[in-house]
Image: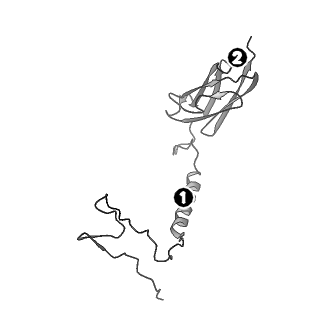
Amino acid sequence: MRHNQNPPFIPPLKQREGKEEPPFCPPASRGREEKNPPFVPPSAKEGEWNGGLTAAIVVFAAVMLVVSGCTSPADDNNTTGPGPELSLSVEAQPSAIPANGSSHLVVFVELLRGAEPVSDSTEVILLNTIGTLGRGVVYTRNGVALDTLTSDTTAGSGWLIAYAQGRRDSTEIMFTLSP
C-alpha cells in the first residue's frame, strides 16, 4: 500500500543585494531597517498556531522527567549494592539569642555519606519559622554548609529546618527578651 506524502517544505532562496540567502537569515548588514518575515509553517495559516512541534517537545520533556525521577540522589550506579547511608544534621549556635532584630546565630549543617563528607557544592535548603536567614540556600564544602539567622524583635521559639538529597533535620531556636 502506498502512502501519499507531501515533500518537506523548503523555502526558496531570495535575492538580496546580489547574493542568494535563505529567506529567514539575518541581513548581512545590521544597520538596515529590513526585517525578516515571521515563519509560518506550510500546514498553518497566518495567525493560526500549529502546536505539533511544541507538543512533541513537551511530551519528550515529561518522559525525561519521569525517567530521571526513577533514580535517587543516592544512586551512584554502584552495582555492588547500596552505598553508605546519607545523614544530615542541623545545629544553631547559640540556639537562643536576644530578640532585638540584630542578633545573629550561626546555622551549621553537616551532610555525610557514611563517615565521609558528601561532594562539595551539594545544595542544602534551609527553612525557618522565626527570624531571617542570610541566604536560605547554601552549598557544602567538606560536608559542611553554613548560614546565619538574624533575630526578630519579638521573643518566641521556632524551628530551623534543613533539607538535602531527600533528607531532613530540624532544631529548635529561641529569641529571648533583652534585659
Residue 70 x %, y %: 59, 51
What amino acid is at disc 1? Ala
Q: Label 1 to label 2, Cα distance in Å? A: 49 Å
Q: Dot 2 surroundings within 10 Å: few (below 14), some, or many (20 or more)?
A: many
Residue 26 x %, y %: 34, 62
Furthest toward the top, the residue is 179
Which residue is denoted by mark 1 in the rendering?
Answer: 61
**Drawn side of residue 8 relative to residue 97, left or right:** left
Q: Dot 1 surroundings within 10 Å: few (below 14), some, or many (20 or more)?
A: few
**Drawn side of residue 99 relative to residue 29, left or right:** right
**Drawn side of residue 154 relative to residue 92, left or right:** right
Furthest toward the left, the residue is 18
Residue 63 x %, y %: 56, 59
Residue 81 x %, y %: 56, 42
Q: Residue at x 50, y 29 (%)?
A: 141
Q: Residue at x 75, y 16 (%)?
A: 177
In this view, the residue in front, 71 or 36, is: 36
The numbered dot on residue 98 is 2
Please, what secondary structure does the residue beneath circle 1 have?
helix
Which mark lies nearer to you, 1 or 2? 2
Q: Residue at x 70, y 24 (%)?
A: 152
